[in-house]
Image (cartoon, rainbow, N blue to C red):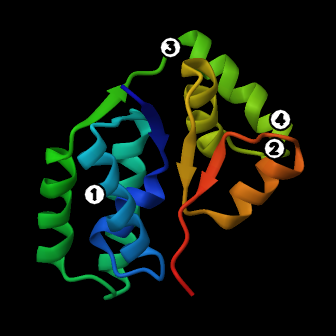
Amino acid sequence: METVVIDANIGVALVCPLPYSRACRDRLEEWLRQGVNLVVPALWDYEIAAALRKQWAQNLLAREAALEGLVRLFRLPVQRVSATQELLTRALTWAERLGQMTAYDAQYLALSDWLGTPFWTADRKLYHRCRDIGVDWVNLVESAQ
């Protein structure tokens, strides 16, 4: 069974109307049809909750939509991986490689690297930064233009 690590921005796009929401829904449907094992760091839930709250606070997403979206996201067959010293150490190293002051994005890369699986994101900047440093197992979910 194929395994992929997915970024929180993909989860957010399943709830919030974003330019790449359709592409994320299509990609998720394809993964589910194929029986792909979706894996995320435990941070995923917190990042999604923060993004939903931000959309809600900015009146870009109704309160009910945010709360219902959270319920839907928890129903997805996503395996959450808790932090370990090894994963956090890897994340710090990834943050350094990416030239980032924080280790949020690096959590996903560390998990993907540790599992030896592809990582999928809708974050163009992160995708291009990874490509710039020679990481070829990072994939970008893009909307059809």
To which residue does mark 4 refer?
96
The amino acid type, in three-letter code, at marker 4 is: Glu
**Which sits earlier in the primary sequence, circle 2 or circle 3?**
3
Disc 3 marks which amino acid? Thr
| Label 4: how many Cα within 10 Å (few below 14, some 14–19, many 20+) | some
The Cα atoms of the two marked residues, 4 and 3, are separated by 18 Å
In whole angstroms, how far apart are the C-alphas of marks 1 and 3?
A: 30 Å
Q: Residue 99 vs residue 7: left or right? A: right
Judging depth in this view, the residue of 97 and 55 nearest the camera is: 97
Residue to which mark 3 is pinned: 84
Callout 3 environment at 10 Å: few (<14), some (14 to 19), or many (20+)? few
- Residue carrying label 2: 98
Residue drawn 16% across the image and 75% down it: 65
Left or right, residue 7 beside residue 140 = left
In this figure, which residue is indicated by the disc labeled 1? Answer: 29
Q: Nearer the viewer, mark 1 or mark 4?
A: 1
Please tell me which residue lies in front, 111 or 36: 36
Label 2 to label 1, Cα distance in Å?
Answer: 30 Å
Which tag, 1 or 3, sits closer to the chain's start? 1
Which of the two labelled residues, at mark 2 and mark 1, occupies the earlier sequence position? 1
On the image, which quarter does residue 90 sit in?
Answer: top right
Residue found at x 51% / y 77%: 143
Q: Secondary structure at mark 3?
A: loop
Quarter of the view holding residue 13 = bottom left
Nearest to the eye among marks 1 and 3: give it.
Answer: 1
Q: Are marks 2 and 4 in contact (CB under 8 Å)?
A: yes
The mark nearer the N terminus, 1 or 4, is 1
